[in-house]
């Protein structure tokens, strides 16, 4: 694996990020929490063995079939059906070589040469753009709109959009496109709601999540994840008792996020929470943050996810979870730690190498001294604040006394959160999440302008994005990351939050739902994509090439089969033969009904034939079938979830 390009030298990574478990992985972004296993997004070195190479997981979960021809036929069919996933968005199969070896800059200069310059090379912007700077990005750009137009409403933009890209998805189905991009997976209810309210009405309602009632699953999550709404004082007082029961607040915070993604009807809000968990990232598990990380999620991310980013950023810089994560409590006027000051610029506002230099970083770190933690609460310590003039990217202040230092710090935070470079960086990241791995410049420019005009109001920026044709013309240009694939699959199956009748558990300290969420969390850790669990401050990458892995894809298909057949025992589920009421009696019509319900498309004839041959080599569209698809219903449904149509957002 190539090392992450290190513009700051060894001292940057040795200045306080790595804790005793070695969670900060300076070889790349792949390390997960050391005691939980798993691996994160992976970046291939063509000279090394790619992750996922070697024996693939068994595509048939029933060992009885292992030596039978039907087993091998189904495996071959699954690979054929899903094999197009390597070329889902027009890029073909590609080796990822965009990350650079230690000692080399993107422009080829040596570290020593770049260190002599006051500003870093502009070729590297952030991890998403870095990954897309090679052949993968060039191929995808050919399939992405290069320009667009703005309209008064999203519905008008959708009506006037013309999809020119090559894609397996329907080019003129704006309801499906909207549901796929703005939710964790469209289900029957989402499609029905959009059709009932109209595109504009549904978006307006999603942007006002407080008007959408909590679902049964959300109510259970609030009640059964007992630490979620606890204050720090309550968690501290009850910590010993909770520990005896195996209950941890940081662990329940991850389970809570999974529950909301799966069961909430406030889907756009949950998408934005997940976006900001990557953008303003604080790792879920970090020494000392066991009792504060959930509060960061509740009081910073969720509170401001559909508000003004400037308020989120200011709140984050007063929260003990972020301060401890980036060692701000260790930074004093006599011993300055640059971690938080650097990431405030590089990751949380203007973006890497985007208008600042090392002098700016040092000045910002000096200004931020005095922000600290006492008894897991934010505190300003004037005696540790550097006093003296500061100048950072156009922000200047005499900073003349320690007592007024906190106010100067907040003025600086607001300045950089509303900086034009932050506007563009935010717009670039939002467009990458919702539109394309290589979003059109015209769209990014329009969103950045709204960000500045509306003082970082996130709903306004989203409305600008949705009211432009680039969004609606980007059909087929986003691939679900592993966690998004899982949630989309479970939502398509309408898996319920209640335990089945007669379910019993040996764990009296944990409800069936909480137990089940833990199983899903561990599966997401296998995928390397459990909410908030990336240990490094950059957050999960948001482009397809970061997640390319045959092993992960087959693991996803196997988990889908597990869900289809009721393997998530703590949740209610429909038997696959009951997914369609009164199913058609011929194989082709039955398959059409299943694909329309589960992935909202009608497949092309080649894929239909491939799936029908999973039933038997002689099965055709006119073959009579029963509700069990002549015994192959689970395999057929899994094959539907293996199609590129389901992998694409």
Image: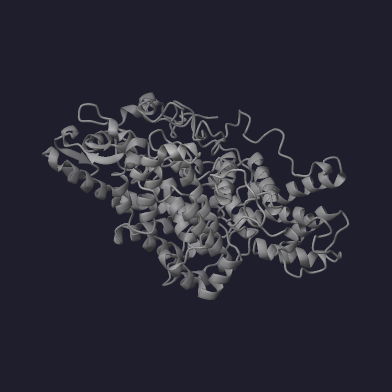
Choose between 335 and 300: the one closer to the eye. Answer: 300
Residue 239: x and y, percent? Answer: 41, 39
Whether residue 537 is visible here, answered yes or no, is no
Spot occupied by residue 92 in the image (x, y as percentages of width and height): 63, 46
- Examine the image and state in which quarter residue 633 appears: bottom right
Q: Is residue 537 left or right of residue 220?
A: left
Task: Answer with the quarter of the image where residue 263 lies.
Answer: bottom right
Residue closer to the observer: 510 or 112: 510
Horizontal arrangement in the rendering, residue 635 relative to residue 111 (left or right):
right
Q: Nearer the viewer, residue 499 or 192?
A: 499
Q: Quadrant of the N terminus?
A: top right
When asked about the image quadrant of residue 408, the answer is: top left
Q: Residue at x 60, y 65 (%)?
A: 171
The number of numbered discs placed on residues in the rendered structure image is 0
Residue 371 in the image, given as x and y percentages of width and height: 24, 38
Q: Residue furthest right?
A: 618
Q: Position of residue 67 (x, y in %)?
A: 85, 40
Q: Considering only vertical position in the picture, is 389 above or below 335?
A: below
**Residue 38 appears in the picture as rendered:** yes
Position of 579 relative to 287 (above/below): below
Rendered image coloring scheme: one colour
Task: Write the residue at 39% across / 51% down.
Answer: 298
* Residue sitting at the far left: 400
Viewport quadrant of the C terminus: bottom right
């Amino acid at each position: 694996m190539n090392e992450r390009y290190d513009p700051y030298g060894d001292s940057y990574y040795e200045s306080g990020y790595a804790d005793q478990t070695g969670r900060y992985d300076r070889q790349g972004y792949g390390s997960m929490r050391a005691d939980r296993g798993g691996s994160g997004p992976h970046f291939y070195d063509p000279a090394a063995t790619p992750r996922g190479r070697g024996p693939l997981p068994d595509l048939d979960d029933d060992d009885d079939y292992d030596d039978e021809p039907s087993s091998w036929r189904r495996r071959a069919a699954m690979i054929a059906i899903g094999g197009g996933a390597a070329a889902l968005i027009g890029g073909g199969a590609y080796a990822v070589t965009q990350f650079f070896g230690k000692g080399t800059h993107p422009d080829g200069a040596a570290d020593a040469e770049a260190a002599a310059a006051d500003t870093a090379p502009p070729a590297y912007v952030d991890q998403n753009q870095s990954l897309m700077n090679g052949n993968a990005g060039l191929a995808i750009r050919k399939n992405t709109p290069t320009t667009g137009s703005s309209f008064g409403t999203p519905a008008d933009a959708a009506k006037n959009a013309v999809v020119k890209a090559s894609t397996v998805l329907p080019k003129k189905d704006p309801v499906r496109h909207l549901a796929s991009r703005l939710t964790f997976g469209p289900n029957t209810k989402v499609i029905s709601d959009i059709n009932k309210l109209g595109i504009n009405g549904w978006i307006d309602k999603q942007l006002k999540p407080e008007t959408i009632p909590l679902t049964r699953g959300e109510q259970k999550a609030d009640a059964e994840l007992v630490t979620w709404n606890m204050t720090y004082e309550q968690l501290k007082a009850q910590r010993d008792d909770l520990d005896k029961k195996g209950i941890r607040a940081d662990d329940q915070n991850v389970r809570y996020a999974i529950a909301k993604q799966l069961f909430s009807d406030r889907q756009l809000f949950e998408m934005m929470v997940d976006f900001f968990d990557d953008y303003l990232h604080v790792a879920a598990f970090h020494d000392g943050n066991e009792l504060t990380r959930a509060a960061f999620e509740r009081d910073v991310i969720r509170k401001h996810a559909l508000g003004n980013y400037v308020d989120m950023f200011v709140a984050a810089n007063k929260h003990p979870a972020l301060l401890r994560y980036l060692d701000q409590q260790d930074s004093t006027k006599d011993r300055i730690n640059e971690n938080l000051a650097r990431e405030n610029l590089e990751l949380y506002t203007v973006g890497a190498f985007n208008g600042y230099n090392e002098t700016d970083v040092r000045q910002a770190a000096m200004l931020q001294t005095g922000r600290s933690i006492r008894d897991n609460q934010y505190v300003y310590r004037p005696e540790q604040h550097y006093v003296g003039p500061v100048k950072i990217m156009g922000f200047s202040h005499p900073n003349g006394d320690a007592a007024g230092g906190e106010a100067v710090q907040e003025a600086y935070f607001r300045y950089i959160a509303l900086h034009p470079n932050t506007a563009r960086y935010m717009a670039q990241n939002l467009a990458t999440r919702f539109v394309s791995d290589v979003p059109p410049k015209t769209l990014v420019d329009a969103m950045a302008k709204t960000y500045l005009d509306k003082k970082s109001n996130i709903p306004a920026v989203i409305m600008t994005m949705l009211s432009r044709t680039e969004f609606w013309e980007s059909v087929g240009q986003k691939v679900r990351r592993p966690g998004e694939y899982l949630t989309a699959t479970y939502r398509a199956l309408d898996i319920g939050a209640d335990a089945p009748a007669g379910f019993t558990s040996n764990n009296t300290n944990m409800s069936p739902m909480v137990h089940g969420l833990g199983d899903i969390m561990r599966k997401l850790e296998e995928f390397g994509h459990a909410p908030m669990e990336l240990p490094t401050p950059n957050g999960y990458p948001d482009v397809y090439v970061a997640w390319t892995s045959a092993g992960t894809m087959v693991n996803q298909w196997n988990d889908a089969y597990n869900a289809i057949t009721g393997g998530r025992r703590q949740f209610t589920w429909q038997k696959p033969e009951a997914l369609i009421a009164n199913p058609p009696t011929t194989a082709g019509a039955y398959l059409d009904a299943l694909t329309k319900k589960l992935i909202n498309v009608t497949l092309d004839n080649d894929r239909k034939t491939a799936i029908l041959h999973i039933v038997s080599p002689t099965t055709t569209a006119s073959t009579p079938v029963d509700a069990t698809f002549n015994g192959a219903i689970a395999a057929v449904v899994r094959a539907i979830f293996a199609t590129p149509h389901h992998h694409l957002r």
